[in-house]
Image: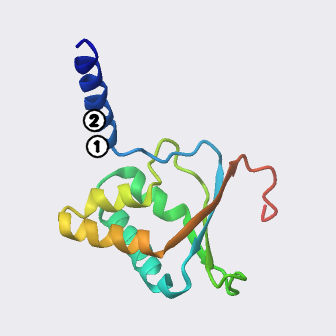
């Protein structure tokens, strides 16, 4: 009898946590992220990245312009043995405390729920797997 209110409270907390989007922030000076994309969905992934760029460029948040200036995406010219294509995100410099979640940034600018779902479905369908995230301090800048 006492368990029901306790469990109800716990479930409510879980729902509240699920509703709040989790930010992706970095503490290093440079970030390198790699994602394996399904070979027949590279155009979809690139549409998602174009939507991200468009959303950040239209954002009134001051950090959005800084994020754009330091965020590059490279498509590997050679497929993996399984046919997937690796996309590498290079972020330098990192904007401290800025949210680098692709979907959070898109949702901040795309308000129509149907459009949000369409972009999410495209993103989810394209993504085979996240491969790695590396972040850390710059130890040498050979251009200087």
Looking at the picture, tell me which residue is in the foreground, 6 or 83: 6
Element at label 2 = helix
Query: Quadrant location of the N terminus?
Result: top left
Q: On the picture, is 123 further left or further right than 134?
A: left
Determine the residue positioned at 23% across, 70% down: 115
**CB of mark 2 within 8 Å of CB of mark 1?**
yes
Q: Nearer the viewer, residue 4 or 52?
A: 4
The quarter of the image holding the C terminus is: bottom right
> Relative to residue 127, is residue 62 drawn left or right?
left
What is the secondary structure assignment of the residue under circle 1? helix
Tell me where residue 56 appears, x and y as whole percent: 37, 63
Residue 119 placement (x, y as % from top left): 32, 71
Position of 46 relative to 19 (above/below): below
Q: Nearer the viewer, residue 10 or 129?
A: 10
Query: In the picture provided, is 99 more to the left or to the right than 138?
Result: left
Work out how far the residue at label 2 is from the one at label 1, CA to CA, in angstroms. Answer: 5 Å
The x and y percentages for residue 15 are: 28, 37
Residue 91 image offset from top left, x and y in percent = 59, 60
In the picture shown, does residue 26 fall above or below 78? above
Residue 81 has which mark? none
Q: Which residue is mark 2?
A: 16
Please, which residue is most extreme toward the front here? 1
Please report the residue visible at 33 percent of the width from the left and 51 percent of the height from the top.
61
- Callout 2 environment at 10 Å: few (<14), some (14 to 19), or many (20+)? few
Q: Dot 1 corresponds to which residue?
A: 19
Residue 140 position by quadrant = bottom right
């Amino acid at each position: 009898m006492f368990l029901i209110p306790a469990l109800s409270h716990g479930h409510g907390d879980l729902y509240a946590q699920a509703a709040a989007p989790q930010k992706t922030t970095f503490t290093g000076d440079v970030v390198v992220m790699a994602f394996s994309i399904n070979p027949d969905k590279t155009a979809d992934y690139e549409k998602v990245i174009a939507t991200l760029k468009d959303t950040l460029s239209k954002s009134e948040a001051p950090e959005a312009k800084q994020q754009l200036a330091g965020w590059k995406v490279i498509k590997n010219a050679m497929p993996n043995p399984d046919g997937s294509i690796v996309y590498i995100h290079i972020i330098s410099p990192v904007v401290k405390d800025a949210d680098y979640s692709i979907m959070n940034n898109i949702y901040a600018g795309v308000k129509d729920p149907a459009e949000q779902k369409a972009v999410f479905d495209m993103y989810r369908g394209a993504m085979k797997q996240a491969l790695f995230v590396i972040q850390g301090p710059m130890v040498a800048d050979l251009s200087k």
